[in-house]
Image (cartoon, rainbow, N blue to C red):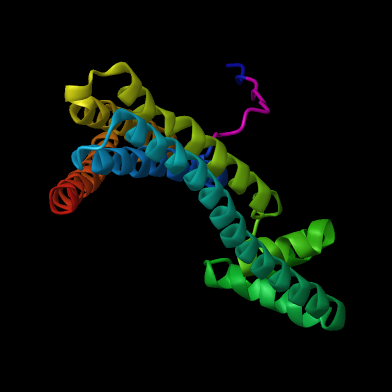
């Protein structure tokens, strides 16, 4: 009987961990945009403010939120990137000053994973010959060269997603009659949050129901609280 030929393929498995950087920034920016802008507008609307005042509040929330998200993400991810660079710098110095000790350290890591001592040392030597720094970055520091933090990417994705999705409650205001501003803004925003929650869960490999429910309930709570506060302030000041 002839043996079936072994079919070689260059196809690689698609893993979701590579999406973590941009996915986190995009989901955080879009969810925060809807929740904060809708809550702000509903709070102002509950105080019996005019449509113009509600619109100004929404646009101001969009601009301020987008800038805040960009700056916040840039600072946060820059700090993470600085820590990664510092660790890499230390590792480079140690590899230059005590290469044999670092080789044994790398082999010890593999031994702790269950590889026999002789084979662990052989693997450590081969990986070091191929990419010594890369091997230590991955197995000792847990840092992938292709997954280093990107502050600018996180900043612009957060700002763009915030500005885009903050338009949803503003559109809800513009298309609804005065008497139903709050219900329309709330309904449109909550439906959008549910869709985003499901999409984020799908992209991240999480259960869709749980991902949808947590953003829906969080948004509903935020809008309810600001509506109550806006109503109380509107009555007391008015």
| Residue nearest the observer in this picture, 158 or 126 | 158
State the residue lying farthest toward the front: 238
Residue 116, image x, y percentages: 59, 69
Q: Quadrant of residue 227?
A: top left
Specify the quadrant that holds the N terminus. Answer: top right
Q: Is residue 104 left or right of residue 48?
A: right
Can I make out residue 232 in this image?
yes
Q: Residue at x 60, y 19 (%)?
A: 4
92 left or right, relative to 18? right
Residue 68 magenta-drawn?
A: no
Farthest right residue in view: 96
Q: What residue appears at the point 38 percent right and 40 percent down from the top-left corner?
A: 57
> Quick check: 209 above or below 149?
above
Residue 106 at x, y percent in the picture: 68, 72
Tell me which residue sits at (67%, 72%) in the image: 107
Rendered location of residue 120, percent (x, y):
66, 68
Count of number-bearing discs: 0
Residue placed most toward the observer, 139 or 150: 150
Q: Give, as a single range, the part of the protein colored magenta.
A: 5-14
The part of the image, by quadrant, that contains residue 202 is top left
Which secondary structure type mostly characterizes the magenta part of the structure?
A: loop
Which residue corresponds to the image point at 58% horizontal and 54% vertical from the top-left?
71
Q: Is residue 119 visible?
A: no
Instruction: Tell me: 159 left or right of 215.
Output: right
Q: Nearer the viewer, residue 145 or 115?
A: 145
- Residue 126 lies, with reference to residue 147, above or below; the image says below
Name above or below for residue 107 compared with residue 223. below
Picture coordinates of residue 36 (x, y %)?
35, 44
């Amino acid at each position: 009987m002839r043996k079936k030929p072994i079919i070689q393929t260059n196809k690689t498995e698609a893993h979701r961990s590579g999406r973590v950087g941009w996915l986190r920034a995009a989901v955080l920016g879009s969810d925060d945009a809807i929740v904060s802008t809708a809550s702000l507008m509903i709070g102002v609307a509950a105080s019996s403010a005019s449509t113009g005042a509600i619109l100004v509040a929404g646009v101001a929330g969009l601009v301020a939120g987008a800038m805040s998200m960009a700056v916040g993400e840039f600072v946060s991810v820059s700090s993470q990137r600085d820590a990664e660079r510092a660790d890499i710098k230390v590792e480079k110095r140690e590899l230059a000053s005590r290469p044999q000790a670092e080789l044994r350290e790398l082999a010890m890591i593999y031994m702790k994973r269950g590889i026999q001592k002789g084979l662990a040392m052989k693997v450590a030597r081969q990986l070091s010959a191929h990419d010594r720094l890369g091997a230590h970055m991955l197995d000792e520091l847990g840092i992938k060269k292709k997954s280093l933090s990107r502050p600018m990417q996180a900043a612009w994705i957060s700002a763009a997603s915030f500005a885009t999705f903050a338009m949803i409650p503003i559109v809800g205001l513009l298309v609804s009659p005065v008497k139903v501003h709050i219900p329309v803004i709330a309904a449109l925003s909550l439906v959008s949050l549910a869709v985003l929650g499901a999409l984020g869960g799908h992209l991240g490999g999480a259960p869709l129901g749980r991902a949808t429910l947590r953003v829906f309930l969080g948004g509903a709570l935020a809008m309810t609280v600001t509506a109550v506060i806006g109503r109380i302030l509107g009555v007391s000041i008015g």
